[in-house]
Image (cartoon, helix red, strand yellow):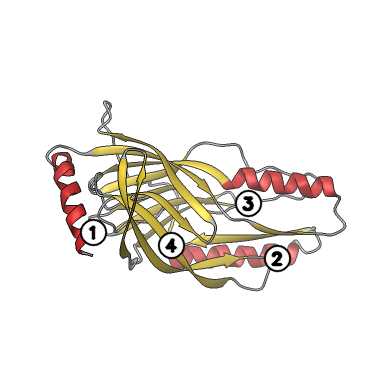
Amino acid sequence: MQTIIRTLFLLSISASTLYAQEFQGVATYKTKNKIEIELDSTMTDVMQEQIMAMLQKQSEKTFTLTFDKEQSIYKEDESLAPPSLGNGMMVMSSYGSDLLYKNIKEDRYTKQSDFLGKVFLIQDTFEKIDWNLQSDTKNIGKYTCFKATAEQLIKIYAHSDESTEKSITITAWYTPQIPVSNGPSKFQGLPGLILELSYDSNTILCSKVILNPTKPITIKSPKKGETVSQPEYDRIVEKKMDEMSVGGRGAGVRVQIEIMD
């Protein structure tokens, strides 16, 4: 622990000049999410391969985190709509946020989410992540990163009567050289920007960081959508999944969706 404190102190000296000015940045993240499906044995090998290929493509996304010292916007790059297999059967590989606003100073977030064609504005406070700082280090690009781990519950929505939860280990690599307590999605609370994060076979990796870009950054919370709390939104998702479970039996595809709170 003394080694961690000593190294963090040295890195904070080089990063201190960033606090002496208006500090802004844009980080680009590549994500790959775990998707589990059950395919009907009557489906042909070609159709099974097509489904797997489309779901895999949908799981690989690019996000940008636009941030300053106190707030940020996390947004997915524009992409094609989820593919349809025809015959009235649609495969949806994920449900989640289109835009996430975080206010680190006030410990709150606003998430604008399009769920099955309806826009919701989810407003809530952050759930505390009990990070365990470790002495491991590695370089990501030109930045020296430290390892941190945490345990957290993840919700699993599938074609069943209700959602389930399981505990997973989150591993984060953060750099004090970018002195913001922020990161991808709702992950934050470390003494530096999170550049890499993994949990349950899912990975999020920062591929590029631009600090203090020439064009000033404007960060605003989204306003469009029906305002709900996070628990209210979770109940809406769970109810809709139950309805789809009843109406979609026998369709030949069962999709399991994992959502990090």
Q: Is residue 76 found left or right of 250 in the rendered image?
A: left
**Relative image position of residue 41 (x, y in whole percent):** 84, 59
Question: How far is mark 1 from mark 4, CA to CA?
Answer: 19 Å
Q: Is residue 190 above or below residue 61?
A: below
Q: Is residue 65 above or below residue 97?
A: above
Quarter occupied by residue 53: top right
Q: Nearer the viewer, mark 1 or mark 4?
A: 1
Question: How far is mark 1 from mark 2, CA to CA?
Answer: 49 Å
Q: Is residue 58 found left or right of 41 in the rendered image?
A: left
Looking at the image, tell me whether mark 1 or mark 2 is earlier in sequence order: 1
**Relative image position of residue 187 (x, y in whole percent):** 37, 56
Residue located beneath label 4 in the image? 170
Q: How many marks?
A: 4
Question: How far is mark 1 from mark 3, CA to CA?
Answer: 40 Å
Looking at the image, tell me whether mark 3 or mark 2 is earlier in sequence order: 3
Which of the two residues, 27 or 96, is positioned nearer the viewer here?
A: 27
Q: Residue at point 69% right, 62% down?
A: 244
Residue 98 makes an appearance in the image: no
Residue located beneath label 1 in the image? 4
Looking at the image, tell me whether mark 3 or mark 4 is earlier in sequence order: 3
Q: Nearer the viewer, mark 4 or mark 2?
A: 4
Q: Secondary structure at mark 4?
A: strand
Amino acid residing under circle 2: Ser
Q: Residue at point 25% right, 38% down?
A: 24
Q: Are marks 1 and 4 in contact (CB under 8 Å)?
A: no
Q: Nearer the viewer, mark 3 or mark 2?
A: 3
Residue located beneath label 2 in the image? 245
Amino acid residing under circle 3: Ser
Q: Are marks 4 and 2 in contact (CB under 8 Å)?
A: no
Residue located beneath label 3 in the image? 93
Amino acid residing under circle 1: Ile
